[in-house]
Amino acid sequence: MAAQKGRDLLIKLDEGGSGAFVTVAGLRATRLSFNQDTVDVTTAEAPGQWRELLAGAGLRTAAVSGSGIFRDEASDAALLRVFFEGRAPAFQLVIPDFGTVTGAFQVTSLEYSGSHDGEAAFEVSLASAGQVVFAEL
């Protein structure tokens, strides 16, 4: 994958479940991580006493975090609704010239900050709440 502009990584939300994803906010920094737990099946007879793992058995998760400024009142209200209602709607993460990650995510953290001489900013964290699908562009 060639170098990309960080600002092109987008978090989009399909709040109503219609399949229409809308960019949530003006992100300045975004992070996407995939994790898979391991299941250790090592026995005393393991060759060379090396750990052995059971392939494909661990719990998989995805986490997204971002910070920036809200584009408008509608995007602010959408994230607040999703958070306070405890829902896990479909989100789509766009990785430019690479692919998209789509799935249900729950807003696990939503923080606001601001200074007297600057704009209001936010930080959001999302945790996967079901199967996540990657599609190459």
Image: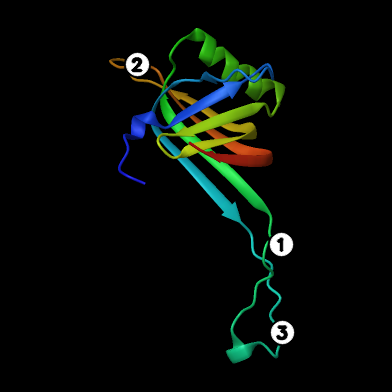
Mark 3, residues whose alpha carbon is within 10 Å: few (<14), some, or many (≥20)? few
The residue type indicated by label 2 comes to Glu
> Left or right of 119: which side holds 32?
right
The mark that comes first in sequence, 1 or 3, is 3
From the viewer's perspective, is 106 left or right of 95?
A: right
Whole-percent x, y for residue 102 in the image: 60, 34
Q: What residue is shown with label 1?
A: 57
Q: Which mark is residue 43?
A: 3
Q: Which residue shows up at 46% across the image and 10% down it?
A: 72
In this figure, which residue is indicated by the disc labeled 2? 119
Q: Earlier in the sequence, mark 1 or mark 2?
A: 1
The amino acid marked with disc number 3 is Thr
Q: Is residue 52 above or below residue 1?
A: below
Which residue corresponds to the image point at 67% horizontal and 66% vertical from the top-left? 55
Q: Is residue 44 left or right of residue 101?
A: right
Measured Cα–Cα span from mark 1 to mark 2: 46 Å
Alpha-carbon neighbours of circle 1 within 10 Å: few (<14), some, or many (≥20)? Answer: few
Mark 3 secondary-structure assignment: loop
Lower position in the chain sequence, tag 3 or tag 2: 3
- Please state the horizontal and vertical placement of residue 100, each as a whole percent of the image: 52, 35
Which numbered disc, 1 or 3, marks the residue closer to the eye?
Answer: 1
Callout 1 amino acid: Ala
Residue 44 horizontal/vertical position (percent): 70, 89
Residue 45 vertical placement versus 110 (above, below): below
Q: Tell me the quarter of the picture where residue 122 sits.
A: top left
Q: CA distance from mark 3 to mark 2?
A: 57 Å
Q: What is the x, y in percent for residue 64?
A: 52, 38
Q: Residues within 10 Å of mark 2 (few under 14, many from 20)?
A: few
At mark 2, the secondary structure is loop
In the displayed structure, 65 sits above or below 36; it is: above
